Amino acid sequence: MPRHSRTKLLHRVTLFVCSGCEPCDQAIAFLQGWINGRAQAEMQVIPIAQRPEKVVRMGIAHTPALVVNGELIAQNLTLDTLAEALRRGIDERVDS
């Protein structure tokens, strides 16, 4: 029998970054503010040097790169494109 739950879906939001990358630092700060208060999402920041095999497997060529629930959403993000990707990738799915 299916369970009916009023709890929102949990989304895993992963940001792949590299060191010394100002856009990556800005994306991390933006994502930390965005994730605050969103019980349906959890955040992970992965430096590409720590997980090169995953970077290659996912096809990440530019940072910062956004992955939601294991799916590469966007790379080489500006804050505007990050906000839009999060809105399309998570907020619209939760609200519908």
Image (cartoon, rainbow, N blue to C red):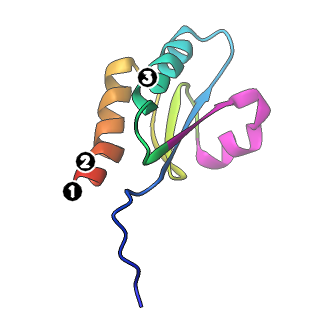
> Which label sits on residue 33?
3
Q: Residue at x 44, y 30 (%)?
A: 36
User: Of helix, strand and loop, which one carries label 1?
Assistant: loop
Where's residue 58, x and y in %? 60, 47
Proximity of marks 2 and 1: CB atoms separated by less than 8 Å: yes
**Disc 2 residue crowd, few under 14, some 14–19, many 20+, Cα 10 Å:** few
Q: Where on the picture, by quarter, is residue 83?
A: top left
Amino acid carrying label 2: it is Glu
Q: How many marks?
A: 3
- Region of the chain picked out in magenta, as a range: 42-59
Tell me the quarter of the image containing the N terminus: bottom left
Cα separation between marks 2 and 1: 6 Å
Amino acid carrying label 1: it is Ser
Amino acid carrying label 3: it is Gly
Cα separation between marks 2 and 3: 18 Å
Circle 1 sits on which residue?
Answer: 96
Instruction: Look at the picture and state if 63 lies above or below 52.
Output: above
Circle 2 sits on which residue?
Answer: 92
